[in-house]
Image (cartoon, grey):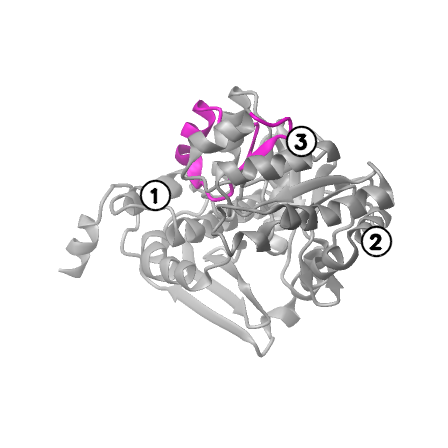
């Protein structure tokens, strides 16, 4: 089997999402995905990765990943190239599953759980405006989520107050305003709802200590990305000054960027995203690395149906899973427009997709939409059969 084409799909209605299809000469097509900063990822996909991957065997997932990574590291890596590689790698696992008629979780070694615990990130999309709802009445939103089978939610009520001071100061009035939605949730549903607080790495440690002190009476589930990940020692000092676990960080790519974080015991919980960090196998390696330190893992999941399915399979497999993030405003709206994937929470958990590979199929109507932007790389690969580091082979081909 050989890779014959690498295709990217983007829809104007869903501009954050980049879907990748890897086509083979056996007629099997694998689905992958990445999210955000799409122009860079698309350029890396077609300009850098496709020449390395065309005419290669798609079942040699580890070999291809290492070959591509070697070439990326030749000039530095960690941005658009890794996002693109993540999408392709996920598609290769989908091809593997379809080749052997096995779901992804079986290929990974089987399940450690039958249902995957989730928290809802309160973003809005289309008719489901959870972001507006937690600003207007977070207690009513919490009740709605409970009725939908969701028992944990994440909001970010302090972000706007970071702008004026660039994250260096929050005053008591702003602090109390940030606590308001948390008050509302506790008053409406008590402790039936777990609450996670996102900070989008907008603050310094001095200000975070003030915020954390105010949050401690509310039995908060976690604090996410409290300080930029480039300051691991500051995050570690904060984690030692609070009873609330700290989560970090979706902005760290591959096992190598997580290694130092774990060695330094920066946070009590780690987070990674399979459509950003290098893919399925890289997520499993990060999880195993975290497990050796006794640290639980959150899977970041704010993309489309392919990322969601990948996170469900990984969440079923990974023994040290804490939660998988999910967004009901996405899975109740555009997931259904683009794919066959249906998602329903029950008692705080989500089910695992069935079928070979990821268990996701794009709808034909989605592929025929007038707002689709399709780009295809095909033909002869410049590195067929190669497994060497560096770009000397490209120069030889050009000559």
Q: Is residue 293 magenta?
A: no
Mark positioned earlier in the residue sequence (3 or 2): 3
Locate residue 147, reporting x and y percent: 86, 49
Mark positioned earlier in the residue sequence (1 or 3): 1
Identity of the residue drawn at 71% across and 58% down: 329
Q: Is residue 11 shown above or below 245?
A: below
- Residue 106's disc is none
Q: Which quarter shows the C terminus?
A: bottom left
Q: Name the residue tied to disc 3.
A: 111
Using the numbered discs, state the Cα–Cα distance from disc 1 to disc 3 in whole angstroms. 29 Å
Q: Is residue 249 magenta?
A: yes
Range drawn in magenta: 241-270
Judge from the rendering whether residue 163 lies leftward or rightward of residue 198; answer left or right: left
Identity of the residue drawn at 29% across and 43% down: 73
- Residue 69's disc is 1
Using the numbered discs, state the Cα–Cα distance from disc 3 to disc 2 in whole angstroms. 35 Å
Judge from the rendering whether residue 158 lies leftward or rightward of residue 394; answer left or right: right
Q: Secondary structure at mark 2?
A: helix
Q: Name the residue tied to disc 2.
A: 140
Q: Secondary structure at mark 1?
A: helix
Mark 2 in CB contact with mark 1 (< 8 angstroms)? no
Mark positioned earlier in the residue sequence (2 or 1): 1
Camera-nearest label, 2 or 1? 2
Instruction: Mark yes or no: residue 337 visible.
Output: yes
Q: Is residue 209 shown above or below 354?
A: above
Near mark 2 (Cα within 10 A), the count class, few <14, some 14-19 or many ≥20, is some
Q: Secondary structure at mark 3?
A: loop
Locate residue 394, reporting x and y percent: 21, 54
Mark 1 in CB contact with mark 3 (< 8 angstroms)? no
Question: In the figure, residue 46 lies in which quadrant?
Answer: bottom left
Instruction: Mark yes or no: residue 156 visible.
Output: no
């Amino acid at each position: 089997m050989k890779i014959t084409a690498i295709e990217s799909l983007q829809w104007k209605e869903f501009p954050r999402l980049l879907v990748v299809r890897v086509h083979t000469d056996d007629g099997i097509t694998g689905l992958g995905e990445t999210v955000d900063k799409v122009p860079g990822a698309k350029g890396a996909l077609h300009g850098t990765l496709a020449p390395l991957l065309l005419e290669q065997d798609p079942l040699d997932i580890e070999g291809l990943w290492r070959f591509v990574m070697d070439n990326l590291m030749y000039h530095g890596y960690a941005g658009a190239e890794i996002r693109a590689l993540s999408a392709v790698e996920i598609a290769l696992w989908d091809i593997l599953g379809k080749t052997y008629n096995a779901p992804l979780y079986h290929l990974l070694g089987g399940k450690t759980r039958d249902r995957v615990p989730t928290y809802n990130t309160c973003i809005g999309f289309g008719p489901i405006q959870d972001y507006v709802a937690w600003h207007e009445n977070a207690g009513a939103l919490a009740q709605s989520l409970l009725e939908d089978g969701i028992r944990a939610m994440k909001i970010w009520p302090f972000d706007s107050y970071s702008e004026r001071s660039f994250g260096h100061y929050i005053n008591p009035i702003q602090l109390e305003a940030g606590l308001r939605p948390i008050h509302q949730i506790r008053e409406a549903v008590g402790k039936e709802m777990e609450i996670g607080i996102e900070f989008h790495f907008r603050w310094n440690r001095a200000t975070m200590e003030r915020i954390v002190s105010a949050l401690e009476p509310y039995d908060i589930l976690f604090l996410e990305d409290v300080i930029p990940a480039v300051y691991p020692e500051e995050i570690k000092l904060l984690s030692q000054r609070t009873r609330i676990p700290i989560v970090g960080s979706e902005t760290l790519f591959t096992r190598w960027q997580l290694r130092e974080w774990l060695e330094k015991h920066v946070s009590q919980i780690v987070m990674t995203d399979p459509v950003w960090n290098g893919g399925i196998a890289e997520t499993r390696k990060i999880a195993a690395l975290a497990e050796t330190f006794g640290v639980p893992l959150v899977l970041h999941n704010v993309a489309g149906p392919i990322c969601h399915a990948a996170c469900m399979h990984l969440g079923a497999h990974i023994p040290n899973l804490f939660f998988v993030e999910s967004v009901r405003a996405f899975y109740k709206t555009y997931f259904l427009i683009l794919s066959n994937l249906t998602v329903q929470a029950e008692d705080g958990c989500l089910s695992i997709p069935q079928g070979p590979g990821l268990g996701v199929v794009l709808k034909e109507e989605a592929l025929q939409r007038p707002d689709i932007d399709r780009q295809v790389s095909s033909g002869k690969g410049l590195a067929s059969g190669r497994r060497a580091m560096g770009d000397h082979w490209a120069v030889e081909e050009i000559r």
